[in-house]
Amino acid sequence: MSKWGHLAQTLAARKQQDLYRSRLTIDSPQAPRVMIEGREYLAFCSNDYLGLANDPRVIAAAQQALNEYGLGGGASHLVIGHHRAHHELELDLAEFTGRDRALLFSTGYMANLGVASALLGRGDYVIEDKLNHASLLDAGILSGAKLLRYRHSDSEHLASRLDDARDSRALVITDGVFSMDGDIAPLDDIAQICHSKDAMLMVDDAHGFGVLGANGGGCAEHFGLNQSDVPILMGTLGKSYGAAGAFVAGSEELIETLVQFARTYIYTTSMPPAVAAAARVSLRISREESWRRERLNELVARFRKEAAGMGYQLAASSTPIQPIFIGDAATAMELSQALRKEGILITAIRPPTVPANTSRLRVTFSAAHTDDDLSQLLEVLHKYRGAANIAGAVNA
Ligand SMILES: Cc1ncc(COP(=O)(O)O)c(C=O)c1O
């Protein structure tokens, strides 16, 4: 038998454990209503929190930039791929975040790997929240540093981990808003602990930018933390800003270190300049149109009140990420499928993305959702409250 026969077995085991993933093919723009195989669904699972992925002004900016710059970036930033649109977006992001400089990466995953690989090596420590996003854990592992994890949002445990690492350099990394739970890290405490123990702090605010803070400045604005409190601030452009890519903002020294040493910055083609041009417009809209954040708060408050009233178990989250905890993967899949039959799309999030027995429906809101959209979701959730109804619906 071939040495590779195990692939089929591994796939079969994944199916049997209700952990098999499959993709949906979307035939429409990213918006509350999406088309899949000729049917319209009301979706509550994208990260397009501000409803900008399909905003006409953002699309027009991309179209204009396509005409001016063409499509591909053409080369890496350090060769000849650093276009004016990239540069201007970096300047806007630096000003917006109140940092010396910002640096674009092609994806958030690459930004995270790039920072850790540029700053850490053998003999260093990287200390991470247990529920950090997979890209941050991978970044820690690939950096070659010793990876320690602390209990979720537990500042005291973090402090004791830092004591374990006291003779070495330590980089502490946390999600700002946790991607699968929606809760906000206690960054004021974490920043203070890092400061007192001479550790470097990195915050991945992929889900906070655009959403938190009066101007959408994310966790840093929410807590009022400046560059010396959070020296490495990472954000993405593919979520609230409806575009693609990511950035790291921080001191001149940090950014130059990344330009020189971050392998995922150096050895890859720059993002299409039209994406950067469109993201600049998204950023401007996000700053100006604070009604989008207010709208999200309204949707979240009503959802939490009514879904909790039906007996659903929700997370301690005030952000547009509002998971409904189910527990086992099979039941989470069943509820997701039952909702889909009713025309509502919410993905079941299962291990290994989340810890065992914490499978959930990750409900997310967009400022583009209407009150009627939410009513429709709540009506269907009402119908399927209780596990017996869920099983019945799927077997019907
Ligand atoms: C917290 C967090 N960091 C990083 C990423 C990766 O960003 P990107 O999709 O731009 O690669 C994601 C999600 O995709 C995320 O949720």
Image (cartoon, rainbow, N blue to C red):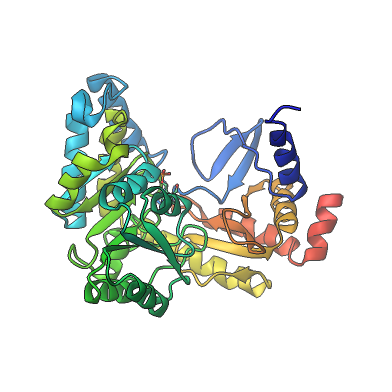
Q: Which residue does the image show at 44% across and 66% down from the upper left? A: 149
Give coordinates of residue 213: x percent, y percent: 30, 64
Give coordinates of residue 172: x percent, y percent: 33, 64
Give coordinates of residue 307: x percent, y percent: 62, 68
Q: Which residue does the image show at 46% across and 49% down from the upper left? A: 47
Q: Is residue 294 above or below residue 6?
A: below
Tell me if 363 is positioned left or right of 73 in this view: right
The N terminus: image quadrant:
top right
Which residue sits furthest right? 396
Tell me if 216 is positioned left or right of 255 in this view: right
Q: Residue 207 falls in which quadrant of the image?
A: bottom left
Please indicate, yes or no, whether residue 173 appears anywhere in the rendered image.
Answer: no
Which residue sits furthest bottom? 156
Q: Nearer the viewer, residue 139 or 68?
A: 139
Q: Which residue does the image show at 44% across and 47% down from the upper left? A: 48
Total marks in image: 0
Q: Which residue does the image show at 31% across and 58% down from the upper left? A: 123
Q: Nearer the viewer, residue 302 or 232?
A: 232
Please indicate, yes or no, whether residue 96 appears anywhere in the rendered image.
Answer: yes
Give coordinates of residue 120: x percent, y percent: 29, 53
Q: Nearer the viewer, residue 104 or 84?
A: 104
Q: Is residue 80 above or below residue 372?
A: above
Q: Residue 25 falls in which quadrant of the image?
A: top right
Tell me if 258 is positioned left or right of 300 in this view: left
